[in-house]
Image: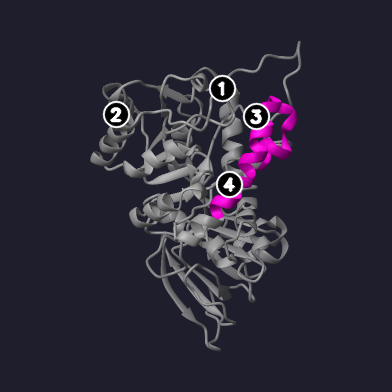
Amino acid sequence: MTAEQLVLWNAHLADAERPLDDTRWSVTIVGDRIHAVHPIDGAERPVDAIDLDGASIAPGMIDAHLHALSGEIVRNPGFGPPPELKGGEPRPRELGYFVLAALAKAIVESGFTTVRDVGSDDLEGVALRQAVDLGIVPGPQVLSCGRIVSATSPGGVLFTPMYRQADGPHEVRKAVREQIRDGADFIKIMATGARSVERENPEPAQLTREEIAVAVEEAHRLGLRVAAHAEGLTGTRIAVEEGVDTIEHGLAVHRDPALLELMAEKGTTLVPTLSTFHDLAERFPESFPQVLVDQAKRQLEEAYQSVAAARAAGVAIALGHDSGPPGDAAIELIRLVDAGLTPREGLDAATRSAALALGLEDRGLVAQGQRADLVIIDRHPLRDISVLHDRAALRGVVKAGDVVYARSAEDQSLRALEG
């Protein structure tokens, strides 16, 4: 439900540009926009305002690296249906779309109001975007790449429904156009191989320089951004030099200070995805060949080094979870701070920096004119960044002016507006 005017009263504010102080604020939302932000200065509460009693308001968070695989529950213990048993009733492929709807609801109710789907089976990310936009299911705003453009590769065997394999500049250009035809909001390419494929080496470039250049040229010509899966240094360097907008994973960038300087100069954003390295190295080692587990342990250390090096070089960093379960993406924010970001820089990575990386300049701050994507939490995240990962501390979520989640009991005033 969207209130014609929603006034959030008596709250602390927290975003990447606001000083940390004890000022209490009023935030007025009209339609899907923040209409006014001003200190209350002891003024009397308007009759229709919701008194937050000193809770904190932060921008809705953004996950810049999500794989919305409806059928993949291996990395999401406790989410989705239990494993199918032999002899049990067969489960149709379409059952996965109900799982996808539950996934979307869990994500937005955790405070993530925008996500970027960087590869999903059978264009599920596009379908989910449409379902959310049409109001069929609750969920975050979804940006989808369609299928990932890769070279012919071993990964293409394992991820056939997610990949569009293409060889040579003409075929790559066609593959980019196909994704746009199918509803992609941006283009994702495989600049290197994948760490999760035993028969791929993630160090050398997978697509050639000419192929990457064509993908970037065609996407940018048509107004779309480009994200590059990039693990090894050579492919990462080519992707940055040829003008991709974001480097996904980027665990090798600490090895080349000149490359980091170039990223900072060109405005290329790093999306480190620390959580996915924890998955292979620590969380699910029994699910992968030992050679990949050993590699992930090395990569985990490098990924943390790359975050610290990128920060020192002035490279923009955006949060990308690349893991599960749905609703748990804020653990990546805590890990970014563990890697060397300050709490303010971590909050920025989850909000404003991520928004700019995705080309969404209308969100990521608690400010007049911004889209009204907000999270309401018990404690100030710049004093305790872990509060954004504490579901018990989450009081409410507003997406484009809609109250999409409200905690029970003391938040009846918010719950009355919940759709």
As shown in the figure, which amino acid type bears the numbered disc 1? Glu
- The answer to whether residue 298 is magenta is yes
Q: Do the residues labelled 4 and 3 touch (CB within 8 Å)?
A: no
Disc with the residue nearer the chain's start (4 vs 3): 3
Find residue 292 and name its label. Answer: 3
Disc with the residue nearer the chain's start (3 vs 2): 2
Q: Of 64 and 33, which appears nearest the observer?
A: 64
User: At 65% across and 58% down in the image, what residue appears?
Assistant: 338
* Secondary structure of the residue carrying numbered label 2: helix
- Label 3 and label 1: CA atoms lie apart by 32 Å
Circle 4 packing at 10 Å, graded few (<14), some (14-19), many (20+), is many
User: At 32% across and 29% down in the image, what residue appears?
Assistant: 211
Q: Of 20 and 397, which appears nearest the observer?
A: 20
- Label 1 and label 2: CA atoms lie apart by 27 Å
| Segment colored magenta | 278-307
Residue that carries the numbered disc 1 in the rendered image: 94
As shown in the figure, which amino acid type bears the numbered disc 2? Arg
* Secondary structure of the residue carrying numbered label 3: helix
Left or right relative to 123: residue 88: right
- Label 4 and label 3: CA atoms lie apart by 15 Å
Residue that carries the numbered disc 2 in the rendered image: 177
As shown in the figure, which amino acid type bears the numbered disc 4? Ala
Q: Do the residues labelled 4 and 1 touch (CB within 8 Å)?
A: no
Left or right relative to 168: residue 106: right
Disc with the residue nearer the chain's start (3 vs 1): 1
List x then y, in percent, for residue 379: 66, 69
List x then y, in percent, for residue 110: 62, 52
Find residue 106 and name its label. Answer: none
Residue that carries the numbered disc 4 in the rendered image: 303
User: At 73% across and 24% down in the image, what residue appears?
Assistant: 83
